[in-house]
Amino acid sequence: MNATLQQIAQRIKQAKSVVIFTHMRPDGDAFGSALSLSSALGDLGIQNQVCVESDIPSNLAFIQGIERVRKTPEGEFDLLVTVDCSDIQRLGALSDEFVIATRKKIDTVNIDHHISNARFAKYDYVRECSANCMNMAALIERLGAPLTKQTAEYLFIGLLTDSGNFAHDDVNEETFALAAKLAAAGVDVRLYNYQLFKKQPKARAALFAQVMSGIRYFFDDRFALITISQDAMKKCKADHGMTEGFVDFLLNVDGVEVAASIMEIKYRQYKISLRSKEYADVNKIAGTFGGGGHIRAAGCMLFGDIEEVIDRLSYAVSQYLE
Ligand code: 5GP
Ligand code: MN
């Protein structure tokens, strides 16, 4: 049911112990959303824990306090909050925990910014904006928690990640207004810019070189794709987290409207990342395969032989090219 931030803040304040879940293969906005809320609840003296099903990606291991994040909840809790998560499946292994909690009549809250959000909780707050951390900042204000430097840093990590360093087309006055507030709270803007968009291990540079040497173009260069195999990742000693930004590089090629990265997660299982430049709705393209996200950035999973996966994907993309 759609709820206001005011209602959600009230419900949270009544909780004794809160569990915060975010989506599998978490990014900066997932951790930023979860940890900012956790930090604010801590400041209010409300017991809480953060869970995500996946390992911590190496590129985000620098985040302060990330070692507190668990794979499954511990002990009793009376409120479950999901953040930056468009549907229950996106919780991965934690989707079972969500279903169990619902059966036990534990209240659930869903705070998200994805256009494809399925409104799956008792209290849903979904508002499209550059980063879910913008929704979190508004909630934290409603909770009456102080904007400490630590909370501001978490919010900034999400804001910077999902706005693509303030470059995506949903960036507006409100995005910058929050950035200004966070800078005033003491966030080291240069540091996070470096950590999230510049710093990389040698393994990533090696993988980047290998993957980009195999860019494939379709439909008069309007669609470009890269494939990232488990073999290439092993050879370069790279991991999944290191591929962040690859698909965006592809999109910057002149003429490309839709870019895709096809990453092998397991044998015959591929995680697809889609981006578009000007008009194509990649949320709809991902939606044809059960995924989703935003109009300019979305994802889904595809299964089977790699060349068949490419055929299916390029056919779906062709339907959205002008
Ligand atoms: P990325 O390509 O960076 O992993 O994700 C881009 C956007 O699409 C993010 O907002 C992410 O939440 C969403 N997304 C990525 N993969 C999936 C998926 O398998 N299912 C859904 N519903 N959304 C996804
Ligand atoms: Mn997000």
Image: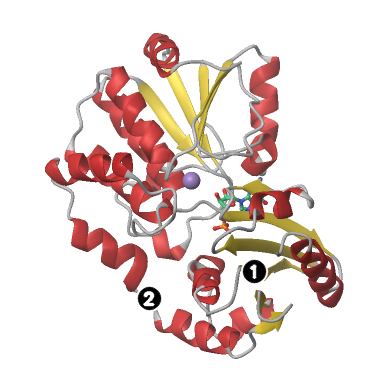
> Where does label 1 land, which residue?
260
Mark 1 or mark 2: whose residue is earlier in sequence: 2
Residue beneath disc 2? 200
Camera-nearest residue between 30 and 75: 30
Could you say whether the residue bearing mark 2 is in a helix, strand or loop? loop
Residue 68 position (above or below residue 47): below
* Picture quadrant of residue 228: bottom right
Q: Is residue 141 above or below residue 135?
A: above
Front disc: 1 or 2: 1
- Is 22 displayed left or right of 320 in the figure? left
Q: Residue at x 59, y 14 (%)?
A: 106
Q: Residues within 10 Å of mark 1 (few under 14, many from 20)?
A: many
Q: Residue at x 24, y 23 (%)?
A: 145
Residue 124 image offset from top left, x and y in percent: 55, 22
Residue 20, given in percent of the width and then of the height, sits at 48, 31
Q: Is mark 2 within 8 Å of ligand 1?
A: no
Count of numbered circles on the image: 2
Check disc 1 and give the amino acid type.
Answer: Ala
Q: Is residue 292 visible?
A: yes
